[in-house]
Image: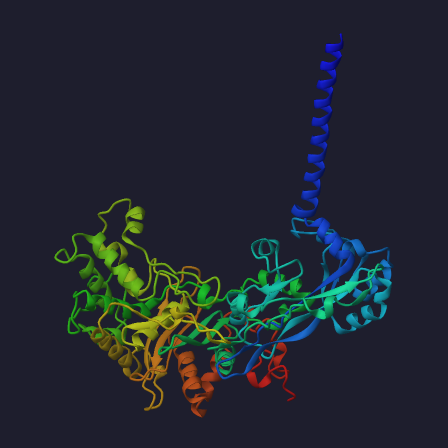
Amino acid sequence: MASTNKFNFEKRKYVIGGAATIIVLILVTQLFALQILSSDYKDSADGNAFYNKTLYPARGTIFDRKDRLLVYNRPTYDIVYIPREVQPFDTLDFCNILGITREELDKRFADVKNKTLNPGYSTYTMQTLMTQLELHEYGLFQEKSYKFPGFYIQNRALRQYNYLNGAQVLGYVAEVNKNMIKNDDYYVRGDYAGRSGVESSYENLLRGEKGVEILLRDAHGRIQGHYENGKHDVAPVSGRNLKLSIDIDLQAYGEYLMQGKRGSIVMIEPATGEIVCMVTAPTYDPSILLGRDFGKNYLTLANDPDKPLLNRAIQGVYPPGSTFKTTQGLIFLQEGIIQPSTMYSCARGYPPGGGRPKCHGHGSPLPLEPAIATSCNSYFCYGLNAMLSNRKKYKNILEAFDRWKDDLVKMGFGYKLDVDLPSEMRGFIPNSAYYSKNFKTENWYPQNVISIAIGQGEVLATPLQVANLAATIANRGYYYKPHVVKEVQDTVLDAKYTTPNYTGVEEKHYVNIVEGMAKAVTGGTCRGTNLLPEIEVCGKTGTAQNSHGKDHSIFMGFAPKNEPKVAIFVVVENGEWGATFGVPIGRLMFQKYLKGEIRPGDKPIEDRIAHAIVHAKSATAWGAGKAKANNETKPATPTENRNSTN
């Protein structure tokens, strides 16, 4: 019996010892998880003694190419709070100060606690309740802040605009969403970031780096000063300033000419790829997307059928029309399909005797340069037929067509040009597989796709791509990637914007295209852009077919001919003939950029274009119709900026 009791005692000893060990392990694990793995304990301990005040940096300012200030900051204020410090307070008084209802206040508190909307929420850390207080609201809250323990004022900066122009290029700043918070540790709920334009594409440089002040608190939570005299404080680093390549005077003038219309004007400096003007119409006053009316105004813009938020220069895709004939001439020359002297007849259409696409009256037969000057459809249709049918050079039509596409890609078509703006579209250049799939056979014929030779059919391009084509021709065979930022403070511009891209077409072939474009101005389809003798313009008109309404009016060109300073592309949706809007707008924009003013003799042209209404809803830049009391449809010009006292 004694041995049995001894055995039971030994068993109980091990059981009790094991249980005690397990309990100790559980306690140690819990303490480890609480103090090491979880931040709640640390937040609680730190929160009792410290108040970490975030210091927001000044966002970088934005200037135009002539150092005129476009975008800057003005002070604004946020209401922030630490949830565990908030005590019962007079919600009616609180709401009256901030101009909100009790329901709105309750929703704001609920949104803060919602970890789906606010990842990383903790009752011990600072939360943002309301942003962008007006000065009088800030004053009232400061006066009564003692009544609202746990609530604080956070200094911020709000964007301010000097001009009413360039909204789609500049972009807007808005509160970050949950995905931005999740993907970037820099942001917390209530922060703001660039959401479009250069504000978005250069966000990481513009935003700067946050700082922090570590403040001591007493047992009642009152601030007692800096911890260790500010030894551990971190000063914020201001964002970097941007200098755009845009000329704001030229931008404003282009927007003035494009009022009442839909479309785009893009002007590029061929020697650098700098975009000096990027107009998209209709446009809007960028200041309407500021402050607490942002949501309401953004929704209005987003629902407008004229799509003023759309940057048509890089997001609009159009058939390039007859401007595309220049690319065809270059390809046919480089591929050895034609010589400059090669002549094709034009019996008002292709093939001879009529058919599609039809042409217009001019001399026949023609060699290449006059074909460019008169914009002969048949010439380039014959040329494409000759290339796709050439079995000495290509084994079949598929190989020939893919060579055609590859040559166009090298010219900057079919893919994004990688401009330094978000949401650029790539346009569309079909390959042989596209047609084989559509025709359900690889044995299709040149006649099936012939309209692409004149920039119709399936071919689509952005205004930026066609403006870049003009710059490439001006340079006789190369281009720099177009960009809207000229300089970044203390930063070297990305090398991709300073490296030339060659098309693979020999320079000598560009000479013929340049001559054809020069003749188009002196005696062909672009006579309306013929300026002074000292400004020799090269141009090409286009009338792009549109299955949804009237055709688009198009013009592409550069000037001067031999020392090009600027290239341009203009498209006016539903403007019909290229000479109706594209050519006169090109004429005026060339003068404005190269001479700085419009000749008195061209003032009637300016007035006609500026007051022509193609789309009634686009008659006024959204939010900018108040610019001139005596001319409600004229957007403000740089001489009428927000700081003007005139």
Q: Residue at x 49, y 67 (%)?
A: 311
Q: Quadrant of residue 303?
A: bottom right
Camera sees residue 577:
no
Query: Residue 170 in the image: x percent, y percent?
Result: 54, 71
Vertical position of residue 592 compared to residue 406: above or below: below
Query: Residue 466 in the image: x percent, y percent?
Result: 36, 69
Q: Residue at x 30, y 74 (%)?
A: 473
Q: Residue at x 62, y 84 (%)?
A: 630
Q: Quadrant of residue 521?
A: bottom left
The colour scheme used here is rainbow
Vertical position of residue 226 compared to residue 188: above or below: below
Q: Quadrant of the C terminus?
A: bottom right
Q: Is residue 119 left or right of residue 262?
A: right
Vertical position of residue 439 compared to residue 542: above or below: above
Q: How many marks?
A: 0
Query: Residue 49 in the image: x percent, y percent?
Result: 77, 59
Q: Quadrant of the N terminus?
A: top right
Q: Is residue 218 left or right of residue 341?
A: right
Of residues 261 and 537, the one nearer the viewer is 537
Q: Quadrant of residue 626?
A: bottom right
Query: Residue 464 in the image: x percent, y percent?
Result: 41, 69
Of residues 579 and 316, the one nearer the viewer is 316
Find the residue positioned furthest to the front.
2
Find the residue positioned furthest to the top.
1
Camera sees residue 645:
yes
Of residues 183 and 272, the one nearer the viewer is 183
Q: Is residue 340 left or right of residue 518?
A: left
